[in-house]
Image (cartoon, grey):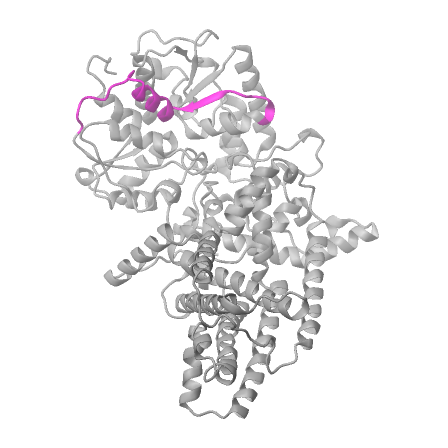
Amino acid sequence: MLISEKNPKMNQSKLIFYAMLNFFNQYFFSFIFSTTFILVIMSGLFLGIGIEQSTASRQIFFNVSPWPIYVLLSVLTGLLVFGVIRHGSLWAIGKPFNDWRLNIPWRVQNTVRLGVMQDKIRRDKYASVMHWCISSSIIVLTFVTAQVALEDDTPLSFLSGNYYLFFSFYGDLFGLIGLIGVSMALYRRYYDDFHRIRWDERIEDHLILWGLFAILLSGFFVESYRISVTELENFPEWAKWSFVSYVLAQFNSLFGFSEELLLNMHSISWWVHVLVVFFWLTLIVFTKLDHFLFAPINAFLLRTDSPGRLSRIENIEEQEVFGVGQIQDFNWKQLFELDACVRCGRCTEVCPANLAGQPLSPMHLIQDLKSHFNEVAPLVQEAGNKGEDIRAVANKAMVGEVIKEETLWACRTCGACVQECPVMIEHVPSIVDMRRFLVMDEAKIPQTAQAALENLEMRGHPWKGTALERTTWMEGLGDVPIFDGTQEFLYWVGCSGSLVERNLPITKKVFSLIKASGSSFGVLGQEETCNGDPARRLGNEYLYQILAEQLIDTFKQKNVQKVITNCPHCFNTFKNEYPQFDGKFEVLHHTQFLEQAINDGKLKPEKPIDLDITYHDSCYLGRINNEYDAPRNILKSIPGLNIIEMDRNMSKGLCCGAGGGNMWQEEVGARRVNHVRSEEAIDTGADELISNCPFCIQMFEDGIPSVEPNEDDRIKPFDIAEVLYQSIDSSSEDN
């Protein structure tokens, strides 16, 4: 399914509104912590003041009999237990996932930060405030209800005096906060031009919102009728603490309602309130409200290693099935993620493939898998219990029919979907697992990608028909040191840096800058071979493991300890994935090395470069490995440069389109991803587009002319090393 519509331009008033939301989100609201802060401060304030009506109290369950609540509570508890057991039994059809036992303190921290404080929600400022209002009101009002139950069912007695007045105040306060949050949600769903919440709209979405609205509003009416009968005339100073209900009670008085009518209205509204509450709570079992439970759990289960590391297939030659071809081939954590999805659309909104009109919507991929899971899992479970063939139960192929092949190949593995997901779903590993099945079990792969894999096997690089050699870039550089184990650094040039014509000048500049820094280093020259990254992203794990193990052996034989890479993909592979095969090396991307050399005074950018530039964060250096500062610090150190950020930058930066092996695939869809990103760079009005990745440079060299045919007005793409080299002291050799 394609979801490619864009938000229309916001008017000035809306921009101001969102700016205010951003302020409150960033500087005031801190979700649960802010709730605690308000409660603690206000309790200290009000309980510390001597209040004349210190004998204030209330009758618990005024005018109603509470016993049906316990019947309803028993039913609700039974439904929740049933739901958890049912879900758990279905997740159990998946393969083992034992990593959750590792690094428990870190997982607990994630649970608090991501699951309880909902840190990721804050990436959408409007949703951040809205969600804080709703979630904090639910938490506090649950606390309010629990206190009423304790007062009624235990010998404890605390709803009196000053605390009762404070209790009345914060109950109304957070009821009002909840109504504000629900109103914001209703506005976004029914009035605003906010499109992503309508990409998969269901009846449950409306029931959840209107049900919560009814709960909060009816709660105020219940309290207003009680106040009208018990406090409005006799204890008006008590009533004022329930400030919202007090206002409603004044209207009751204004209309001259009799006490008998008020009592009847109180009883009716109380039952409406209770029934709606329990109806709403039952939705947790059957709707996306189950994220109340699943989101914190999924935060706990979140991987403890780098998001740039794909899973290793252990004992690969002994496997009967490679990757994931059927629903039970996923591990149980991946199946758990399907139930955690809330269909918010954030993943799809940032997906570069979707933005280009290509056949990938991460949200719909997860939902399609969930529907298939709900259909097939009980059958798999039943077949397993009977000792029958569990691989014969599905009436349609998960990979190929439920999830189309073109959907899987459209993924850039850029991690934008994973970054944005507020319930911590990890889409990319599941997509690559299904690719592995296609490639290694079904022998299905786009022709151009297959050609790249064949080149890897035969030539040690993915490029077809290149006339260049691994050492072509060395021409004109004089004596290029070959790594012999005595130097501090291995400079890893990589396939793109040595075999793609446009990237040769970049490689030369990086080499010259390392040399100018006075560092001890060498290169492998003709001994370089691909580290296997394209094979792994394209799903051929078998080929990747062969290439990785070969290169690790080479590194160990040559006593490689520290590696400098041109390419963020090579950087990620060496840093995050080679340790899976006992290949542990200190790895630096060239921007990290150059930043450190500048900080140490080994490189001095002195020559001014009076240009407006914009910087593109490559996915595998930025979002995947969280390195945003080093490149920008280099650019800031160059005199004269004026940096203009694109609207999508840093962790929200858009992929160039090359990731996930798409450098070697033909794109299917309305547009090419590199054209979309090129337009965003052109819109800045900058003179040059700076990046740190040879893949990105290639994509922009192709994309910019397609978007801007006029060569004179065209923004020019360069690697950051090329710009830095221009500013280094003229005593450096010019290459």
Query: In the image, is residue 3 above or below residue 449?
Result: below
The residue lying toward the viewer, choosing from 63 and 16, is: 63
Q: Whole-percent x and y of residue 112?
A: 53, 47
Q: Whole-percent x and y of residue 233?
A: 45, 85
Magenta-highlighted residues = 580-609
Residue at 48% over, 69% down: 165
Residue 173 falls left or right of residue 79 = left
Residue at 32% over, 27% down: 502
Question: Splitting the image into 4 quarters, where does residue 187 fall?
Answer: bottom left
Q: In which quarter of the image is the C terminus?
A: top left
Residue 247 falls left or right of residue 399 = left
> What is the count of numbered marks?
0
The residue lying toward the viewer, choosing from 191 and 637, is: 637
Query: In the image, is residue 92 above or below residue 534?
Result: below
Q: Can residue 322 be seen in this view?
A: no
Residue at 46% over, 17% down: 562
Q: Whole-percent x and y of residue 290?
A: 59, 59
The residue lying toward the viewer, choosing from 712 and 122, is: 122
